Image (cartoon, helix red, strand yellow):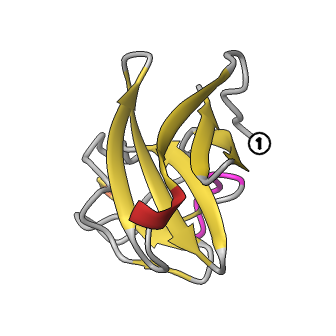
Amino acid sequence: MNSGNSGSFVRAALEADLVPGGKLVLEINGKAILLCNSNSRVYAVANLCSHASEKLEGGRVSNGWIACPVHGARFDLATGRAKNPPAKQPIEVFETRIVDGWIEVQA
Ligand code: FES
């Protein structure tokens, strides 16, 4: 698992602004991060596909994965693992937590 858990938690967005199935694009500590709401959970991943460094933000989110909009690789939002080609490497994932209605990300 490629977990970027070196930093402290940063307040990122209001929980109410991330609807089920939705995404939010953010920059935290200079990192482009994508928040995703899937399976009643909030995930934070790098907004960068491991295959050809395209942005993931336009991709479909479903059942705990996101599909890259460019060549269709899917990534597990919890672990970053590539679920199908053409991607082989994982994407970076970040820990999240909810505090007082805010989504906080460890990045
Ligand atoms: S850039 Fe994402 S699968 Fe190719």
Q: Is residue 84 visible?
A: no
51 over 7 or under it: above or below = below
- Quadrant showing the C terminus: top right
The residue that mark 1 highlights is 1
In the structure shown, which secondary structural element does the residue marked by tag 1 occupy? loop
Q: Quadrant of residue 5?
A: top right
Residue 100: give x, y in percent of width and height.
67, 48
Q: Name the side, left or right, on which 38 lies relative to 12.
A: right
The N terminus, quarter of image: top right
Q: Is residue 65 above or below residue 48?
A: below
**Foreground of the two, 57 or 103:** 103
Q: Residue at x 62, y 74 (%)?
A: 64
Q: State the image coordinates of residue 77 (x, y, percent, origin top left).
A: 61, 60
The image quadrant in which ligand 1 is located: bottom left
Q: Residue at x 35, y 55 (%)?
A: 24
- Residue 81 on the magenta segment: yes
**Prevalent SS, magenta region:** loop
> Is residue 28 found inside the magenta-colored segment of the image?
no
Taking depth in this image into account, of 73 and 47 the one nearest to the observer is 47
**Mark 1: few/some/many CA within 10 Å (<14, 14-19, 20+):** few
Instruction: Report the residue that reaches farthest toward the front.
Output: 100
Badge 1 amino acid = Met
The residue nearer to you, when weighing 70 against 92, is 92
Q: Residue at x 53, y 59 (%)?
A: 15
Q: Quadrant of residue 83?
A: bottom right
- Residue at 22% across / 63% down in the picture? 70
Point out residue 93 in the picture as x, y percentages from the top left corner: 61, 42
Where residue 55 appears, as percent x and y from the top left, is 26, 48
Q: Is mark 1 within 8 Å of ligand 1?
A: no
Q: Is residue 70 visible?
A: yes
Which segment did they paint magenta?
Answer: 79-85
